[in-house]
Image (cartoon, rainbow, N blue to C red):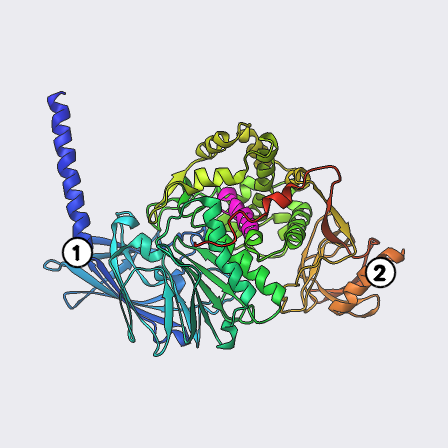
Amino acid sequence: MSRLSLALLVVLAFGSIGARHAHAQDRERPITLDVDAREAPRGILHARISIPAPPGALTLRYPQWIPGEHGPTGPINSFTGLKITAAGHPVAWRRDPVDMYAFHVDVPTGANAIEATIDFMESNSPSGFTGAASTTPHLAVISWNEVLLYPAGRPARELYYRASLRLPEGWKFGTALPIQQSAEQGIRSKPVSLETLVDSPVLAGEYFRAIPLSEGPISHELDMASDSREALEIPADVLAACKRLGVETGALYGARHYRDYHFLLTLSDHVAHFGLEHHESSDDRVGERTLIGDAKMAKIAIGGLLAHEMSHSWNGKYRRPAGLATPDYHEPMQGELLWVYEGLTTYLGNLLSARAGFATPEQYREMLAGTAAFLDHRAGRAWRPLIDTTVAAQLLYVSPGPWSSWRRGTDFYPEGQMIWLEADTVIRQQSHGERSLDDFCRRFLGGESGPPAVKPYTFDDLVAALESVQSYDWRAFFNQRLTSTDPHAPLGGVRNGGWELIYSDKAPDLPEEPDGGGGVDLTLAIGAQINGDGTIGDVVPGMPAARAGLAPGMKLIALNGRKWNADRLKATVKTTNKTKEPLELLVENSEFYQTLRVDYHEGARYPHLKRTEGTPDLLEEIIKPHAAPAGKG
């Protein structure tokens, strides 16, 4: 060993000791974040942040790229009232002229910390993710990234925070955040990394219920808050399936990467409805009467959502595409592998929902048929390959609805499901039933159990892992499907599974999702969606409605010379196979009126899967429960 090498090792050793010392100091003197949510019922949060800092220039950042939202969605416009002090004296701040999420301050001589106070004004928009509506007079979902600043220059996993939250009187809460103290006035966390803090939202409410789902060293819990007490009454079969989900995920992945897991289920008509994954919890939001309304809808809606978001604990949080495993909330994410992150999770979430008993095999197939048909009527397939929808995800999440069929949207969710279904069937066929995608899940997404961790991967890693399960040209398999501009959907998994996609005039035996606006979706028939007020929501290029001249934004006034309504339109379309006359639509376009004639004669058109005689039913094998009937999650 040369003297130079020895010197270098000494420097590195002392550097490592220094880094460990700084790390220990962070734990001993963490950034403190105190959030007052007592005004959450009227949509206001107050926060006070104390950040240790030596004198000199300091840049503070507001989180911009939010994990799981796949875009620069940090709600900076709702971040208000910023004031900064040091040793009790005001300190001026200035926003960066290029980076709108960065604030520059000069810490004065003699100070060793700064204190910032902020207000966060909750949005009432029903569309979006955590930056959208998240509070009502009776509940609140607190996403910590909305009410904090962090010093630039260090990874989120190396910055330590101690958070406190004060709630309205009488409210209860659920969270995966490690809690040090809980009292009537609120909660106080243990010192945790900024990464853990942002990954641990809090659900709180006046009407709150916590239900244990499993026992053992790793527990699962369903935490629910709603705008009414009765909405928290969960049907016995839904609760049984929730418990079963924890068992089935254990059987599929073979390991867990969380200490405990919390489903944070919000039941309200006044918050944005979505699901957002976290490592040890999920932020799941549905309508107020989801559990106490239609029984079929309760199981399917809850099952699909919970299974999808929970699966992200393995696929997305633990194993994460390298382009999405950014060190902080400032570096832009690269979503090229979202067809794995979201597409594979869509596939696994749906099959886990069936395995856990949220959906019957028949319902699983009907939903799969609906997905296949949706993708097969996506006009934009002819110009936009699936891979571009992943790269441009941050644009597509917020793109407008009109012309979505031609533009395409975040199709990597449903189309990813179809691609991974095909991959599963290929493994089963090539191995003569010896192996399946479950083996890949255990090897690649499961690994060893332990506390939360992030293990990034690349496309090459993915291909190698699949090769280790079943020898096949997986690189060519995926590349062909990701770059294709074939106008038809990839239905190889349906065919390999022993089924084919067909259409008939019989509606599927599935609960209808509450539209709320009384609209009509005729995409598979004339190629148009009509909103409840008659406005044309979307039109599929090349289909009868588009050929007749219909376009998004027009408004339907009359059908065949009579004032239109949803029931009349559906009934009339259903009888088009018995007449040669076109549908006559009187439409308003801006302040002008015109009559369009839609030449369509196929009647009602619904998708279904039909068994292919003489072939193995792999779909039945795929969704068959894999865990023993009884067990602990």
Q: Label for residue 28? A: 1
Disc 1 marks a residue whose amino acid type is Glu
Of residue 237 and residue 598, the one placed in the foreground of this image is: 237
Determine if the magenta segment contains residue 350.
yes
Whether residue 35 sits left or right of residue 389 in the image: it is left
Q: For residue 273, say whether it is visible.
A: no
In the picture provided, is 397 more to the left or to the right than 507? left
Q: Main secondary structure of the magenta part?
A: helix
The quarter of the image holding the N terminus is top left
Residue at x-position 82% and y-position 63% = 572
Q: Secondary structure at mark 2?
A: loop
357 or 72: nearer the viewer = 357
Region in magenta? 338-352
In the figure, is residue 474 to the left or right of 504? left
Q: Position of residue 576 (x, y in %)?
A: 84, 58
Mark 1 element type: helix
Q: Residue at x 67, y 60 (%)?
A: 510
* Residue 241 locus on image (x, y percent): 53, 59
The kind of residue tagged 2 is: Thr
- Residue extending farthest to the top is 2
Is residue 601 rendered to the left or right of residue 213?
right
- Report which residue position mark 2 lands on: 575
Residue at 42%, 72% (x, y): give it. Answer: 208
Identify the image quadrant of residue 40: bottom left
**What is the crowding at mark 2: few (fewer than 14 residues within 10 Å), some, or many (at least 20)?**
few
Residue at the location (49% across, 64% down)? 285
Q: Nearer the viewer, mark 1 or mark 2?
A: 1
